[in-house]
């Protein structure tokens, strides 16, 4: 079965602290993984995807096929990073996204 | 370029009534998806159009939900009759049909409250 799991509903850190939002997936085949973010009063938007191997707003995510994980990391959190983060897996058959439950990141001053 | 537009932004109706949500995708995007986030739960896939054809409607919860995309442009999602458990945020997303470029752009969502 195709599934995405984000074990933490809420992650609260202080400004300047490192952040890691966990994401594990279940998928038979080569997965394509994404992180989407929804800031307060804004629409859901793409943050990054694993095939691009890019860093956006200081965030990176590495696909670990052995551990079936795609954790999102940032070395120094900023207050403006506070948002809801969703990990998503794209089905190669249909192109639809399968989302995790989402993690609220709260960065305190 | 205009983004994905959804209307209404918020709808409050009573159980048993009908509501129609509309989505205008980005011009030229043949893929159109509907998703739903029920309070406290994950965003779940409802269905996928390619132009006017339903490619995958495996996520539609029951026959009270009807989605259309006549002409392959905007899409509507009708809930009739609405039940309490239909409350949530309904997202629409669109993308181009292009290999390696199927990145979804989401609308702001339509919040549905059924009383």
Image (cartoon, coloured by chain):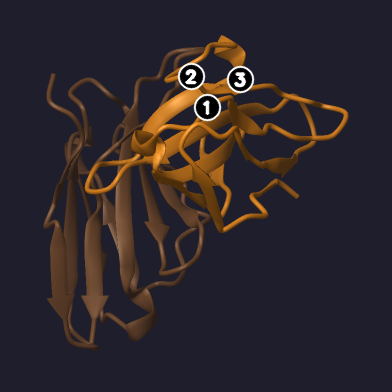
Could you tell me which chain the residue with mark 2 belongs to? A
Q: Colour of chain A?
A: orange
Left or right placement of residue A98 versus residue A64 in this view: left
Label 2 sits on residue: A58
Mark toward the start of the polypeptide (3 vs 2)? 3
Residues indicated by labels 3 and 2 sit on the same polypeptide chain: yes
Q: Is residue A89 above or below residue B113?
A: above
Label 3 sits on residue: A50
Left or right placement of residue A77 versus residue B112 in this view: right
Label 1 sits on residue: A76
Could you tell me which chain the residue with mark 1 belongs to? A
Q: Are marks 3 and 2 in contact (CB under 8 Å)?
A: no
Question: What SS does tag 1 mark?
Answer: loop
Residues indicated by labels 1 and 2 sit on the same polypeptide chain: yes
Q: CA distance from mark 1 to mark 2?
A: 8 Å
Front-lying residue, A48 or B14 = A48
Write the residue at 34% across / 35% down. A80
Which quadrant does the N terminus of chain B fall into?
A: top left
Give percent across and percent down for residue B75. Answer: 22, 46
- Between marks 1 and 3 in the image, the one whose residue lies nearer the viewer: 1
Q: CA distance from mark 3 to mark 2?
A: 15 Å
Could you tell me which chain the residue with mark 3 belongs to? A
Image mark for residue B43 = none
Q: Is residue B39 visible?
A: yes
Give percent across and percent down for residue B33. Answer: 37, 42
- Between marks 1 and 2 in the image, the one whose residue lies nearer the viewer: 1
Counting other residues with Cα less than 10 Å from the Cα at mark 1, is it few (<14), some (14-19), or many (20 or more)?
few
Q: According to the colouring, which chain is brown?
A: B
Q: Is residue A109 above or below residue A62?
A: below
């Amino acid at each position: 079965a195709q599934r995405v799991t984000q074990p933490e509903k809420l992650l609260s850190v202080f400004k300047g602290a490192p952040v890691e939002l966990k994401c594990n997936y279940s998928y038979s085949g080569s997965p394509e993984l994404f992180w989407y973010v929804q800031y307060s009063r804004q629409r859901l938007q793409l943050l990054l995807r694993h095939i691009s191997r890019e860093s956006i707003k200081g965030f990176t995510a590495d696909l670990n096929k052995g551990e079936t994980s795609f954790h999102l990391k940032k070395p120094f959190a900023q207050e403006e990073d506070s948002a809801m983060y969703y990990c998503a897996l794209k089905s190669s058959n249909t192109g639809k996204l399968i989302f995790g439950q989402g993690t609220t990141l709260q960065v305190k001053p | 370029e205009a983004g994905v537009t959804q209307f209404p932004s918020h709808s409050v109706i009573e159980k048993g009534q009908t509501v129609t949500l509309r989505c205008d995708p980005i011009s030229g995007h043949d893929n159109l998806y509907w998703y739903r986030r029920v309070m406290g739960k994950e965003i779940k896939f409802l269905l996928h159009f390619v132009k006017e054809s339903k490619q995958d409607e495996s996520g539609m919860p029951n026959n009270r939900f009807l989605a259309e995309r006549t002409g392959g442009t905007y899409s509507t999602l009708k809930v009739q009759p609405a039940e309490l458990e239909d409350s949530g945020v309904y997202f629409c997303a669109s993308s181009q049909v292009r290999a390696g470029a199927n990145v979804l752009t989401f609308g702001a969502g339509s919040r549905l409250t059924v009383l």
